[in-house]
Amino acid sequence: MTALPLRQRPAWMSLIRHFEEVHSLHLRDLFASDATRGLRLRAQAEGLYLDYSKNRVTDETLRLLFELARESELAEQRDRMFRGDHLNVSEDRAVLHVALRMPKEATLVVDGVDVVEQVHRVLERMTTFALAVRSGEWKGHTGKSIKNVVNVGIGGSDLGPVMAYEALRHYSRRDLTFRFVSNVDATDLVEALRDLDAAETLFIVSSKTFGTLETLTNAQSARQWLSERLGEDAVAKHFVAVSTNDVKVRDFGIAIENMFGFWDWVGGRYSMESAIGLSTMLAIGPEQFNQLLEGFHAMDEHFRSAPFEQNLPVIMGLLAVWNRNFLDCPTVGVMPYDQYLRRLPAYLQQLTMESNGKHVTIAGVEVDYPTGATYWGEAGTNGQHSFYQLIHQGTTIVPVDLIGFAKSLNPLGGHHDILTSNVFAQAQALAFGKTAEEVRAEGTADQIVAHRVMTGNRPTNVLLAELLTPRLLGSLVALYEHSVFTQGTIWGIDSFDQWGVELGKVLATQIIPELSAATDSELAHDSSTNALIALYRTLKKAGDTYGH
Ligand code: G6Q
């Protein structure tokens, strides 16, 4: 990147001056002074309608933000990503999740290899396997067909699969059971397997590195569970692997013909449409999986070709920067008004926070501005009856993405209109609030008025689509991916590494033997950690009333 440091970019300096002029503007006034605002500040692509009019921006804010994108070389960086340049500088890797969803006829040669051809070769193997399992042709060790699929993975090797399964459950084979085991807490595995018949169960061990302690621990225990019931020879028909590491897969005891590969240029949190999506393909079938890929690809093309001013990911990314760096909002809420998307907030939490939670620029220089916000959320309308109070009246401004659909996959009475009315009503309430005069006019006693005032001026994006389909899900996820990319590019950070998760893993590895050894070793940590370990050892040895 040759862009100037962020604070020296002319558009950034203009935005700082501009903020002084607009920071006290209220959305009430912005709407009152422009009857067309809600028709102008909107954009549409690939079945997603984005209303961003309820953000605290003026036309000038937007002009400067688009200028900032240009000065930050967003187009150049985007093109470098699509070309396969090593944008993940700290790991010296290309960032090519966009290649995972390119059509078969496309080519993309990176380091002398056509990666699209590689991708489609794996997709074909996944398809053959998925068809065999779904048709019952793939038999388990005892000759029974597969009825249960258990994905064992964590982080990027879990959140995508579980989110996609939940999101597309409507399209899934209802006679197959899907479970997702991620936590090294044995409870996760034990509860997942409790009612399953081993003879009908297939394990997918999903791990890019095949070196992740949690996943390997769960996979070993799953193998033991299976072997105890069907014998060690059963592993061949009941275990498949998704990984980039064929040596470790073989060492674990899974044959290479039962391994589905991907590549180091696919980041874990960007991998749900690679072979990591095998459970998704088993659930919804290859054709619908293909539609998911088409949805991703369509949004990629939109990001690649639409002018910034009409480009959904660019607009959302720039607004996120505005809210983070100028309105000083430390968190963002993502609220899908669709029960099937209930795991989307968790998925986006990893995508956004692992990507943009960084403290140095690509050049390794400490940033002097805030980067990635904390993302969190809950499916609507549940959140409205709990934490929305703070969003409406708290002292922290929380920008919210509200995601709604015009049609329900489960039309039932008046449910869907009630649900969707809340999407629109929340955006209205957050933007316009309720003044003291309005509260008083309702006959509220003077001493209560202040409590009932809603200041409003709280930003929202509303994303509206017709129906949740595999294709739409692909476009929606790609929209967030490229919004994350836009933010990371403005901030000049490496959105594709995750060094912050390493230290805790290393320290835990040192502590494991101190907790599990038969004899208590000397402890040489800080006094707090020493005391915690000592107490753990004592409590572990003590008998309890349940006789464990
Ligand atoms: C994602 C992260 C991380 C990763 C998990 C699992 O971007 O790198 O969440 O996906 O740590 O890693 P493995 O797939 O290698 O087991």
Image: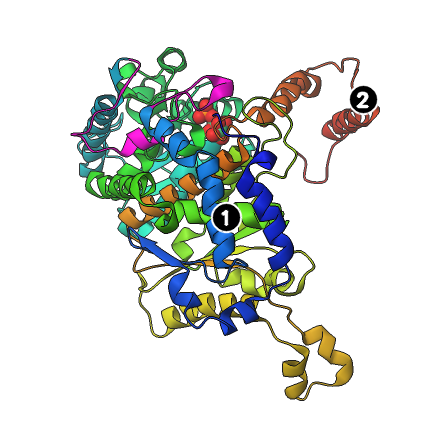
Q: Nearer the viewer, residue 535 or 333?
A: 333
Of callouts 1 and 2, which one flags the residue occurring earlier in the amino acid sequence?
1
* SS of the residue under disc 1: helix
Q: Tell me if residue 459 is in the magenta stretch.
A: no
Q: Residue at x 24, y 33 (%)?
A: 102
Q: Quadrant of residue 511?
A: top right
Q: Tell me if residue 105 is in the magenta stretch.
A: yes
Q: Is residue 313 left or right of residue 24?
A: left
Q: Could you say where residue 127 lies in the image, as x and y percent from the top left? A: 20, 32
* SS of the residue under disc 2: loop
Q: Is residue 95 left or right of residue 54?
A: left
Q: Which mark is residue 526?
A: 2
Can residue 405 be seen at all in this image of the molecule? yes
- Disc 1 marks a residue whose amino acid type is Leu
- Disc 2 marks a residue whose amino acid type is Asp
Q: Could you say where residue 39 lies in the image, as x and y percent from the top left? A: 38, 66
Q: How is the image coloured?
A: rainbow
Give the mark toward the camera: 1 or 2.
1
Can residue 195 be seen at all in this image of the molecule? no
Q: Residue at x 62, y 57 (%)?
A: 21
Q: Residues within 10 Å of mark 1 (few under 14, many from 20)?
A: some
Q: Quadrant of residue 50?
A: bottom left
Q: Residue at x 60, y 67 (%)?
A: 456
Q: Which mark is residue 358?
A: none
Q: Could you say where residue 256 lies in the image, as x and y percent from the top left? A: 29, 15
Q: Which residues fall within the magenta stretch?
A: 84-111
Q: Nearer the viewer, residue 148 or 129?
A: 129
- Tell whether label 2 touches label 1 (CB within 8 Å): no
Q: Is residue 509 left or right of residue 43?
A: right
